[in-house]
Image: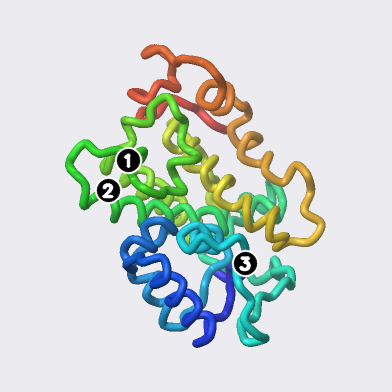
Amino acid sequence: MPVQSIRGNSELAKLIKQRRNDLQLTIEEAATIAGVGTKTWARYEAGGSIRRDKIKGICKALKWHSFPSPGEQTDQTNEKLDIHELKNHKAWSIFLEKRFGEYAAASFVIGSDILIDHLSEDIEKISSMPRGSHVGQIDFSWIKDILPRQFLTRYDYEFLYSLYCTAKRFQDLVSASKESPIMAHSVLEELTLYFIVEESRLLLEEETLLSELPDDWDNWVFDLFDDMDIITWLYSDFSISTDNPYHFDLWFENRFLMH
């Protein structure tokens, strides 16, 4: 996916490595704090490119207030991404484009890729922890911040893997047929689509990748569901009872009929 990135170079790589050493952090420790894999961090220190959605985590790990811009070679481009480039991505949904517009299709492309990346990182981390560990015990997790708080201790390896498979399945559906309807029949599928929108938010809003982004660009997911129940029940100050369809025990059941 052509997500905006910073072109790596030896000067930037040297700054990152020197700062990590100054803080007496191992690559593993820095990568954990940043929320990336150790191989990804090693690429940063070897002069590899850096995705802009990873900058916040790098700054957190290295205790930088802002990301350095060493010389012209760093190429922190502020040019807006051409939306037509995203249309070449395997996850560009003509169904979403026709029904909700280009911004919906763009957020699905960007958000699904980032969600899958973040889930892969959390799965790798939690796989080395004792059985029964949950995402709240991971030192740094982007996913933890967007999951409903009530069921935090239920988000174990198996749950993260199920969420990962659901996100991949949505991408594969679109890849197989660009006009395939995207539907959610379970709470897990609703959450996956909601997370896709949230994961795309930073790049769509803060990085201003798309020109003339409308205020309601993120409403497509609720229009798809035809309600905002996922927010009402999972992100409000309610304690959800076991018979409520939004209780964690029922997230995997196909309960919704969508047209």
Q: Earlier in the sequence, mark 3 or mark 1?
A: 3
Q: How crowded is the residue under tag 1: few (<14 C-alpha within 10 Å), some, or many (20+)? A: some
Give the numbered dot on residue 137: 1
Q: Which residue is mark 2?
A: 126
Relative to residue 3, is residue 60 drawn left or right? left
Front residue of 36 and 234: 36
Residue drawn at x 81%, y 57% is 212
Q: Nearer the viewer, mark 3 or mark 2?
A: 2
Q: Quadrant of residue 138?
A: top left
Q: Are marks 1 and 2 in contact (CB under 8 Å)?
A: yes
Front residue of 143 and 17: 17
Mark pair 3, 1: CA separation: 35 Å
- Asked if residue 192 is positioned above or below residue 97 in the image, the reply reads above
The amino acid on which the numbered mark 3 sits, given as a three-letter code, is Leu
Q: Judging from the image, what secondary structure is the residue with disc 3 in?
A: helix
Q: How crowded is the residue under tag 3: few (<14 C-alpha within 10 Å), some, or many (20+)? A: many
Q: Position of residue 234 (x, y in %)?
A: 51, 25
Q: Quadrant of residue 17?
A: bottom left
Q: Earlier in the sequence, mark 1 or mark 2?
A: 2
Relative to residue 259, is residue 122 drawn left or right? left
Q: Quadrant of residue 219?
A: top right
Residue closest to the far right: 212
Of the 4 image quadrants, the one containing the N terminus is bottom right
The amino acid on which the numbered mark 2 sits, given as a three-letter code, is Ile
Give the numbered dot on residue 86: 3
Q: How crowded is the residue under tag 2: few (<14 C-alpha within 10 Å), some, or many (20+)? A: some
- Asked if residue 103 is positioned above or below residue 187 in the image, the reply reads below
